Amino acid sequence: MAKKSTSSKIQKTALYNFDTRWEELMKNKDFVKVFLSDVLEDYIIKQRWYGGKASKLKYIELAEYFRIQQNEEVYYGLILEVNFVEAFYQHYFLPIAFVSDENFAQDDRILPISIQNQEGFIIDAINLEAFRKVVFERILTAVPNDTTRVQYNKSLLFHDVVYESSRFMGLEQSNTSIVYNEKFVLKFFRRIYADRNPDYEMSRFLSEKKEFKNTPAYLGSIQIKDHENVNITIGLMQEMVENDGDAWDYMLSELHKVFSNLEYKNITVANLPRTEDFLRLDIRDVPPQIIDWAGLNIFTKIQKLAKRTAEMHIALGSEFEDTAFTPTRFNNDYTVWLKNRLLYQFQNRLNTVENNLHKLDGLALELANEFLDKKNEIRKRFVSFDWTKLKSERLRVHGDYHLGQVLVKGDDFYILDFEGEPESTIRDRKVKQPPLKDVAGIFRSFHYAIYATIFNNIKLYKHSQEELFEAGEKLYQYLVGVFLGTYVYEIQEANINIGYNQERIFLLKYSLLEKAVYELGYELNSRPRWAVIPLKGISNIINN
């Protein structure tokens, strides 16, 4: 290897020259050493999909590499092991291409390089249309029971198409999605795990085996076998659902109208009726004062979302052959796993609250002090999980269910992104859980949407923040009640066992507390002003 530094023109392009063909470059130890130590460490920490920004990077190793190719076109897929000073590591997928025309290297240039005296750039291959086309065509021409190292799989639904176009879907955090022909979406998983991705497993199961219509149809995937013969999911191809945006934005828009109505209809918040927590409601059970204030539309939409959520759980709970999806009972192993996980997380959040009290004031500070004062009571709640009293069943669940994971299309909803909770290990994401954990996730999302609406529009509303919070808590109870009314009815009609009423309320409260404690860490670290939302959720449960 010769390092080049003879002219300013060359400085802008090739800093390194390797006398090795591109097709053999990954076998060149000098190149791999330079690429990992001199280049990638600087490149990777700037990427949106990099999840280690809160930790200190120690070094990067090349865990695996493989070819993604078609005929003479060769690209490399790299599995990078990023090691941190804090003694843990993460794996990332990075496909690379070599281009000699800098017009193809406008974005994500990783390394100016000369290969056998041909100057060019190594870039993230996803920026290159030729690479995107190769991947599309490899999935489209996939053969059943592929036994090669890089395995392409396609659904029976994916046929009679040709490549027309491809583009980036938009800004994503942990993955990169490509839209093909304005009809299909290929999600490249960036942070990866030594196992099949839950999003792939769940999407394929729901779409192919259960024909669940309210999730994007599974069309294909890319897996690789690592050196230990373990399947790793690299990409997931699905249909593109034409939509009007996600349910989070939709709910914020609807709730803004609701809170604006307080002034428009001259409503006295103190006179608005409350309902009992977790009481199952039909829309006819919602008092006229609440309907007059909030309108009928928000409740009919909640009913539809509850129906689609129930249908998802019915599909996941009606499998009796594939053991990865068959329902199972609560047992001691699950209880030990749950308590250990939650007590560790709870201790972490206690430390975070204590270290960030100085960032809080007003109601948030008051609730944070209550959280610290009642830490033993909260810990006791987590420890009180007694599986012997539970008669319901555990299922594979969505695992990270919130309004942002739901698309709105007309009057209907489509559920997506089954990867699971970002902080969890891949194994933990596949543990069967009470389906009410997903329900608790969407309830926490309702709570967030209410408070986000207040925070985002506080200057537009004439009522005080305290009155808005009070109105929001009353509305939240009715949204929860109407959702439960439809959800429980649909689930019971399909004979999915989610327990008797007292058990359901216990599991909901437990899962809501778990979710709110989980959220607390993120808010205190990222936007302390919003910490009041999970703190209020925790307070609601422990003071109920």
Image (cartoon, helix red, strand yellow):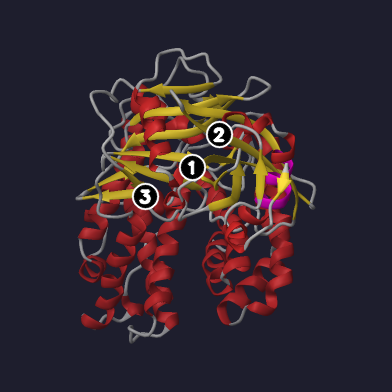
* Mark 1 / mark 2, whichever is N-terminal: 2
Q: What residue is rendered at 28% in x and 46% in y? A: 413
Return the mark for residue 169: 3
* Secondary element at image label 1: helix
Viewer-side residue, 300 vs 110: 110
Magenta-highlighted residues: 32-40
Q: What residue is rendered at 39% in x and 38% in y? A: 130
- For the residue carrying disc 3, how many other residues have a C-alpha within 10 Å: few (<14), some (14-19), or many (20+)? some
User: On the rendered image, what quadrant is the N terminus found in?
Assistant: top right
Asked if labels 2 and 1 touch by Cβ distance under 8 angstroms, the answer is: yes
Q: What residue is rendered at 73% in x and 48% in y? A: 37
Q: Is residue 503 above or below residue 51?
A: above
Q: Is residue 156 left or right of residue 67?
A: left
Name the mark nearer the viewer: 3 or 2. 2
Amino acid of disc 3: Met
33 is within the stretch colored magenta = yes
Viewer-side residue, 356 vs 509: 356
Q: Which residue is mark 2?
A: 76
